[in-house]
Image (tube, grey):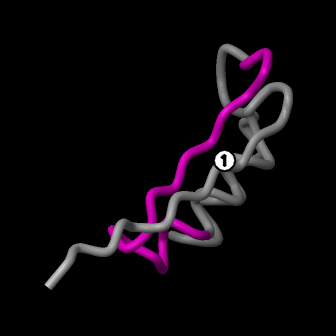
Amino acid sequence: MTDVPRPSVLFMCVHNAGRPQMAAGCLRHPAGDRIDVRSAGSAPAEQLNPGVVKAMAELLG
């Protein structure tokens, strides 16, 4: 039996401080280890948007 590679998904925007983090979290939560999920930015911010952190805590609690 051959091993099937896991799918890989990349969410990306300029700062990687909000939208890609939310998208990655929303996929990673139900997918577990079945999908490699990553987020990136072309000019990453130094920290996540605090509103995103709060929203994700409420959503995925």
- Residue 1 vertical position relative to residue 47 in the rendered view, above or below: below
Q: Quadrant of residue 18?
A: top right
Q: Spot the residue most to the front.
A: 1
Pointer 1 local density, CA inside 10 Å: few below 14, some 14–19, many at least 20: many
| Relative to 23, 6 lies left or right | left
Q: Quadrant of residue 35?
A: bottom left
Residue sitting at 20 percent across and 78 percent down? 2
Q: Nearer the viewer, residue 18 or 6?
A: 6
Where does the N terminus fall, quadrant-wise?
bottom left
Q: Is residue 18 a member of the stretch shown in magenta?
A: no
Q: Which residues are magenta?
A: 27-44
Mark 1 lies on a secondary structure that is helix
Residue sitting at 80 percent across and 48 percent down? 19
Residue sitting at 37 percent across and 73 percent down? 34
| Relative to 28, 13 lies left or right | right
Three-letter residue code for mark 1: Gln
Percent coordinates x, y for residue 21 in the rendering: 66, 47
Percent coordinates x, y for residue 32 in the rendering: 37, 72
Q: Nearer the viewer, residue 52 or 27?
A: 27
Q: Nearer the viewer, residue 21 or 6?
A: 6
Residue indicated by mark 1? 21
